């Protein structure tokens, strides 16, 4: 079950009854005036036409039809407004459903607080940051915290929708409301009451009240402008026609006004915006504002991390490369020894490959008693520091015997020598230059050349050294994520430039970039370089998208127009970003860009549709405005049954098109990976030309039906 | 048919050739790069700058530019107003005409200052030679103003400094190095064809019947040249270009058409040279195609107007009217009443759109407004916020563009309605109002709002209401859009164009077709009902 997927089968059902109620409340003209000026004018038209039906006498000279006609027109006008408020209320109900779903998680649970040496049961709301609690299998984690002790599988499906529990051990972040699936852990609470991640998410979704984005503001201005023009046109026409002795029916003129006004887009505009946030929600991304979703559509530069986004982030051994005088087998053996304490995926991959090939040496006592050297940013090597016995305490003891095929190995002999000499020594693997510094007695030119050869294939060269002798290199290869090439090709087709950030050397990075279809590489980059790049591109006028998970990504995430933080990332990153990806899938940014584009496309498509609709409406309505006028016959290409049916048919079409397009507004116009020029031509053909043609057909059809009914 | 087609092609090709060279020169003025004969030209300009106390290198913000533009125009307007009021006591008054009424003086002064040249008088009867000569000042300043604004507008697009140039320097350069020299050449050409150029106000000659007659003449050739080249359009004589002294033969007819189209067509070319040839071509294509189509539509109504001038034939008359009104010059070489209803409709549409090609500078800026509206109406359809020349269109720019677009129908429709409601149409055209009477009233305000100047009413409208109402419409129709467009330019001038292609490239066929379609659609949506009950009915 995924709580953010509102359409999921078991997901929360939006409260449609409340939506219905809301839609009626929103008919209040004060509310419309603030939110939807186009609809306010329609409502004013409704009031006027209704008044004409109630008191025709007050509109002498402007009322020429039977009374029922005015009531019907008034009804259709009110329906038009209601359809628009309904579409907004429904999309809001869907948003609320997600908040409610999150709320259910935020319950008060009993927590086992550790006081001294005993556990005290307290309600979770009484916990403070710094408190330590025990959580056993099957219990809920009371609030956000860090694992102090123990390891466990945590079921986070209620947050992420990921059904497989994730493994966490000490130091790992756990989220309040998730459940410990196995084992028992001690958790140090880090969040204050009411400020947990869940609380933040709820307030995010709730407050996604959408400050209007620039493009929505612009569009609203345009719609109000068009409405103003048609108001001027229709009122000027009323005065002029009067002086020309034309018999004008005010209700029909109001119908013309409403038909010409961009009611379709005006009515659906709020719904489209809300739907955008809902759709990134479906992709399991929490958007802090609708603005960010729209900005995603405008992104023209994506700055992506290599590891985790483009590649799997798990480097595996591709091959062992011996230096002159050594064999592959010996490099494998040395690499195996250097990795015996290595718990990283890379280390495990080395062990695995060495074992597969049978390139495994028995461990000598000094190795067994040795100390693990962990990789750090400073030393950039890892391996084993051989145990140094105090003089005299450790003579040559029983040495393990090497398997016959390894007996000839130089590495084995070296180990034996070391065992005898008892001098300090290390078995290391690491960055080529770091190893070079530690082992000066190597043929530097050869090592660098081999390293470069590895880089050229897109691999990362790792040098292996046993006691200052460099034996050879490991070609570690990070695999591309499945389908990343297709995804990036799709992104590029729409004109977005991609930049890959990596700490790797230039050569390696370039090969990967080329394979993945990345446009530009920032190799050898430090985390701070990301921010510099974001600022630079923004200064050039680009809209920049960034994803990240580390605290040092936070400034870039905050600065970027679209910053997506991984849920697995640090809280600093999550706070700085304007979206959080619950699946922690860095490639998700591509999906978000797609949703942003869809949102803008939907707005554009319905606006275009709305405007081109007007052509047909002039032809169907205007002859009815000036019936009998010789010029009207010129425009009357539609040959509608009568002025009355023409007006009714047009107004019915005008109202019905709003609910008819609600599904499109909620789902969005289909996104295709292609140059924008092609999108433009195709969408103009569908929504522009389609918008010009459809009302002719639809209104004619409705008119034929009405002719049957009215006779 | 062949002769007519070749006439048309000849005019367009020559206008484009002239526009090409003028466009190149405008580019130099826009970018400030050295012009041909730069040392010579700056030697001429320098004393003028010194006398006027201008530092031509001091670039202005859009507000300063607009303020300078308005003050200069106000000065010129007041000057014309005073001269017209006082012409009775001023020299060069051979026919001894008295000063005009204040409302006519207001109307005429604003009319010439705004490059409209709507005339509620007949020049030969109501104006002294001194007044006619004085009106040639606004006839240079008014087009110079619009050309300068257009130059500043294009200049603002690629910069990011917030400065759009020096108005006084632009105006001086435009007047001294474009309008004056070309007008002199055209005046000489016209003079060679029999257009009079003299300071003697009257010509006494024998009539066919043997008696003697007095014909008013004057510096007609110089008037005529700047009237056409500067899109002024106001006639020296009441009959405008139908008068044989203004437009004696078929050659002068075509010559005048070519010169009145030259500067308006030069603007998209200059824009193309500054911001990319394709972008300029797209605008030029929209202008030319719209122009051809509207001309074709007018011809369908029967090319030959009734009561045509035999000097030009029906085709020549129509070509002249169409070009003159399309370029918002407003000169006419035949009575508007004689046109078919299709031709009248076509003229209305040209004035509603105001941008195919529209007046020099102003027409081009209007086309950019249509482009911005088009980009925002349909541009989101590609999934990106619309950009113009690589700059995101801001909500403020959209607001300014929408208001600019709104000004035109408001200035036409509301005054027309008022004129009817308060009986001013009926007052001069009688009751009951016929569709034709309505058409004339609508045309008057359309022409005023578009700063066009052609009209049906002429001296009939010399009443306080019509003089003041159309005067105000001309002022608002001129300076409100220019102010708004400079504000848009100001916004662009702080950002600087990016080299990257826009989400919807403004240089391709798809955009060109869309801009063309929406320009017509938007104008049709706003004005169609008013055409249907008027010009259509005849």
Image (spheres, grey):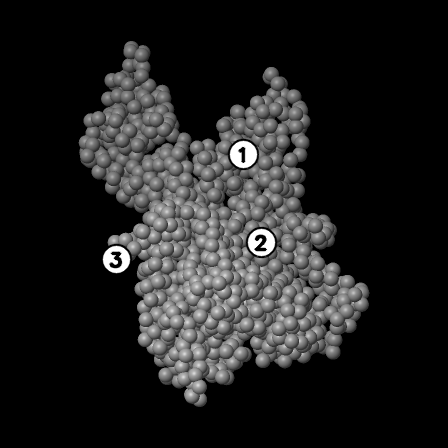
| Quadrant including the N terminus of chain B | bottom left
Q: Residue at x 48, y 66 (%)?
A: B117
Callout 1: helix, strand or loop?
A: strand
Asked if labels 2 and 3 share a chain, the reply is no
Q: Nearer the viewer, residue A287 or B442?
A: B442
Going by the image, does A36 lie left or right of B236?
Answer: right
> Can you say whether B103 is above or below B395 in the image?
below
User: Which chain does the residue under circle 2 lie in?
Assistant: A
Q: Residue at x 31, y 38 (%)?
A: A505
Q: Whole-percent x and y of residue B284?
A: 40, 66
Picture quarter containing residue A424?
Answer: top left
> Residue B37 bears which disc, if any?
3
The mark closer to the camera, 2 or 3, is 3
Picture quarter containing residue A431?
Answer: top left
Q: Which residue is mark 1?
A: A153
Q: Characterize the local packing of mark 3: few (<14), some (14-19) or many (20 or more) Cα atoms within 10 angstroms.
A: few
> Can you say whether B83 is above or below A444 in the image?
below
Asked if labels 1 and 3 share a chain, the reply is no
User: Which chain does the residue under circle 3 lie in?
Assistant: B
Going by the image, does A318 lie left or right of A187?
Answer: left
Q: Nearer the viewer, residue B365 or B74?
A: B74
- Using the numbered discs, state the Cα–Cα distance from disc 1 to disc 3 in whole angstroms: 84 Å
Q: Residue at x 54, y 38 (%)?
A: A165
**Is there any visible trace of residue A598 in the rendered image?**
no
Q: Whole-percent x and y of residue B361?
A: 42, 60
Q: Characterize the local packing of mark 1: few (<14), some (14-19) or many (20 or more) Cα atoms within 10 angstroms.
A: some
Going by the image, does A440 lie left or right of A704?
Answer: left
Q: Nearer the viewer, residue A348 or A558?
A: A558
Q: Whole-percent x and y of residue A150?
A: 52, 26
Callout 3: helix, strand or loop?
A: loop
The mark closer to the camera, 1 or 2, is 2
| Quadrant including the C terminus of chain B | bottom right
């Amino acid at each position: 079950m995924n709580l953010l997927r509102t359409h999921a089968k078991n997901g929360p059902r939006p409260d449609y009854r409340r939506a219905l109620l809301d839609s009626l409340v929103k008919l209040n003209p004060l509310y419309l005036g603030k939110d939807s000026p186009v609809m306010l004018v329609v409502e004013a038209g409704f009031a006027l036409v209704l008044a004409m039906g109630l008191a025709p006498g007050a509109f002498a000279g402007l009322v020429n039809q039977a009374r029922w006609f005015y009531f019907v027109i008034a009804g259709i006008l009110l329906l038009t407004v209601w359809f628009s408020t309904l579409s907004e209320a429904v999309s809001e109900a869907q948003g609320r459903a997600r908040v409610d779903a999150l709320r259910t998680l935020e319950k008060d649970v009993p927590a086992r607080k550790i006081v001294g040496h005993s556990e005290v049961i307290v309600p979770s709301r009484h916990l403070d940051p710094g408190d330590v609690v025990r959580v056993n299998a099957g219990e809920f984690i009371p609030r956000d915290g860090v694992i102090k002790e123990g390891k466990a599988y945590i079921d986070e499906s209620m947050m992420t929708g990921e059904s497989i529990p994730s493994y966490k051990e000490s130091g790992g972040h756990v989220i309040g409301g998730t459940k410990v699936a196995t084992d028992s852990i001690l958790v140090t609470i880090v969040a204050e009451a009411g400020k947990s991640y869940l609380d933040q998410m709820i307030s995010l979704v709730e407050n996604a009240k959408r400050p209007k984005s620039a493009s929505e503001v612009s569009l609203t201005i345009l719609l109000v402008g068009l409405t103003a023009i048609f108001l001027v046109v229709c009122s000027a026409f009323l005065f002029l026609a009067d002086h020309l002795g034309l018999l004008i029916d005010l209700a029909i003129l109001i119908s013309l006004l409403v038909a010409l006004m961009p009611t379709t887009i005006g009515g659906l505009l709020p719904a489209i915006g809300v739907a955008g946030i809902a759709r990134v929600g479906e992709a399991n991304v929490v958007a802090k504002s609708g603005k960010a979703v729209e900005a995603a559509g405008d992104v023209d530069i994506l700055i992506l991390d290599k590891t985790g986004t483009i590649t799997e982030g798990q480097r595996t051994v591709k091959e062992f490369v011996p230096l002159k005088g050594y064999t592959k087998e010996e490099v494998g053996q040395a690499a195996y020894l250097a990795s015996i304490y290595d718990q990283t995926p890379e280390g495990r991959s080395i062990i695995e490959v060495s074992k597969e090939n049978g390139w495994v040496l028995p461990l000598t006592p000094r190795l067994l008693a040795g100390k693990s050297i962990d990789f750090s940013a400073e030393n950039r090597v890892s391996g084993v520091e051989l145990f140094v016995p105090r003089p005299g305490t450790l003579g040559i003891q029983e040495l393990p015997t090497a398997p016959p095929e390894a007996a000839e190995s130089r590495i084995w002999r070296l180990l034996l020598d070391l065992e005898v000499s008892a001098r300090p020594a290390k078995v290391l693997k690491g960055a080529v230059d770091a190893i070079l510094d530690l082992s000066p007695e190597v043929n530097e030119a050869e090592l660098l050349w081999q390293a470069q050869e590895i880089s050229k294939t897109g691999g990362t060269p790792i040098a292996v050294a046993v006691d200052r002798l460099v034996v050879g290199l490991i070609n570690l290869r990070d695999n591309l994520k499945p389908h990343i090439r297709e995804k990036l090709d799709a992104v590029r087709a729409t004109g977005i430039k991609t930049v890959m950030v990596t700490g790797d050397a230039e050569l390696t990075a370039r090969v990967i970039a080329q394979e993945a279809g990345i446009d530009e590489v920032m190799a050898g980059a430090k985390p701070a370089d990301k921010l510099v790049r974001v600022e630079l591109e923004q200064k050039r006028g680009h809209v920049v998208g960034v994803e990240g998970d580390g605290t040092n990504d936070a400034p870039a995430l905050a600065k970027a127009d679209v910053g997506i933080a991984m849920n697995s990332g640090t809280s600093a990153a999550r706070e700085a970003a304007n979206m959080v990806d619950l699946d922690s899938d860095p490639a998700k940014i591509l999906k978000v860009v797609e949703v942003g584009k869809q949102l803008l496309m939907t707005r554009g498509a319905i606006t275009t549709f709305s405007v081109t609709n007007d052509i047909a409406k002039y032809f169907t309505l205007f002859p009815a405005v000036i019936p009998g006028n010789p010029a009207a016959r010129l425009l009357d290409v539609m040959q509608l049954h009568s002025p009355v049916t023409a007006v009714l048919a047009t107004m019915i079409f005008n109202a019905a098109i709003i609910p008819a397009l609600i599904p499109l507004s909620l789902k969005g116009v289909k996104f295709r990976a292609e140059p924008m020029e092609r999108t433009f031509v195709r969408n103009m053909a569908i929504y522009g030309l389609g918008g010009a043609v459809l009302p002719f057909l639809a209104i004619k059809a409705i008119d034929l039906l009405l002719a049957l009914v009215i006779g | 048919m062949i002769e007519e087609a070749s006439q048309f092609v000849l005019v367009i090709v020559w206008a484009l050739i002239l526009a090409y060279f003028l466009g190149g020169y405008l580019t130099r003025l826009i970018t400030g790069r050295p012009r041909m004969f730069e040392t010579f030209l700056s030697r001429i300009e320098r004393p003028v700058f010194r006398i006027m106390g201008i530092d031509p290198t001091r670039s202005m913000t859009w507000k300063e530019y607009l303020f300078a533009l308005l003050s200069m125009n106000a000065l010129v307007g007041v000057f014309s107003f005073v001269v017209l009021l006082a012409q009775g006591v001023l020299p060069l008054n051979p026919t001894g005409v008295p000063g005009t009424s204040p409302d006519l003086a207001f109307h005429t002064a604003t009319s010439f200052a705004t490059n409209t040249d709507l005339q509620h008088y007949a020049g030969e009867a109501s104006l002294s030679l001194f007044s006619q000569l004085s009106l040639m000042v606004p006839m240079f300043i008014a087009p110079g103003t619009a050309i300068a604004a257009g130059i500043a507008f294009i200049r603002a697009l690629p910069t990011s400094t917030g400065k759009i140039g020096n108005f006084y320097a632009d105006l001086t350069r435009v007047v001294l190095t474009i309008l004056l020299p070309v007008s002199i050449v055209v005046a000489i050409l016209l003079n060679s064809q029999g257009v009079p150029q003299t300071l003697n106000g009257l010509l006494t000659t024998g009539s066919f019947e043997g008696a003697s007659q007095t014909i008013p003449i004057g510096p007609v050739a110089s008037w005529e040249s700047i009237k056409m080249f500067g899109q002024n359009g106001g006639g020296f004589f009441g009959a405008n270009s139908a008068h044989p002294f203004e437009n004696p033969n078929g050659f002068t007819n075509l010559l005048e058409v070519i010169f009145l189209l030259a500067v308006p067509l030069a603007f998209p070319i200059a824009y193309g040279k500054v911001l990319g040839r394709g972008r300029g071509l797209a605008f030029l294509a929209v202008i030319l195609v719209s122009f051809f189509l509207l001309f074709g539509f007018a011809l369908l109504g029967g090319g030959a107007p009734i009561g045509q001038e035999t000097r030009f034939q029906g085709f020549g008359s129509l070509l002249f009217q169409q070009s003159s009104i399309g370029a918002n010059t407003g000169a006419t070489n035949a009575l508007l009443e004689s046109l078919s209803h299709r031709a009248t409709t076509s003229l209305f549409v040209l004035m509603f759109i105001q941008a195919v090609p529209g007046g020099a500078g102003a027409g081009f800026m209007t086309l950019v407004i249509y482009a911005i509206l088009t980009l925002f109406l349909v541009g989101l359809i590609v999934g990106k916020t619309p950009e113009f020349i690589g700059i995101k269109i801001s909500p403020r720019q959209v607001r300014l563009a929408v208001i600019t677009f709104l000004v035109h129908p408001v200035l036409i429709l509301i005054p027309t309605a008022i004129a009817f409601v308060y009986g001013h149409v009926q007052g001069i055209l009688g009751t009951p109002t016929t569709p034709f009477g309505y058409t004339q009233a609508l045309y008057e305000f359309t022409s005023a709002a578009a700063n066009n100047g052609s009209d049906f009413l002429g001296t009939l409208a010399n009443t306080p209401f019509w003089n003041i109402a159309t005067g105000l419409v001309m002022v608002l129709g001129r300076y409100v859009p220019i102010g708004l467009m400079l504000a848009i330019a100001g916004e662009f001038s702080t950002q600087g164009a990016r080299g990257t292609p826009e989400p919807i490239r403004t240089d391709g066929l798809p955009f060109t077709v869309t801009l063309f379609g929406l320009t017509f659609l938007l104008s049709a949506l706003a004005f169609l009902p008013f055409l249907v009950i008027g010009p259509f009915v005849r």
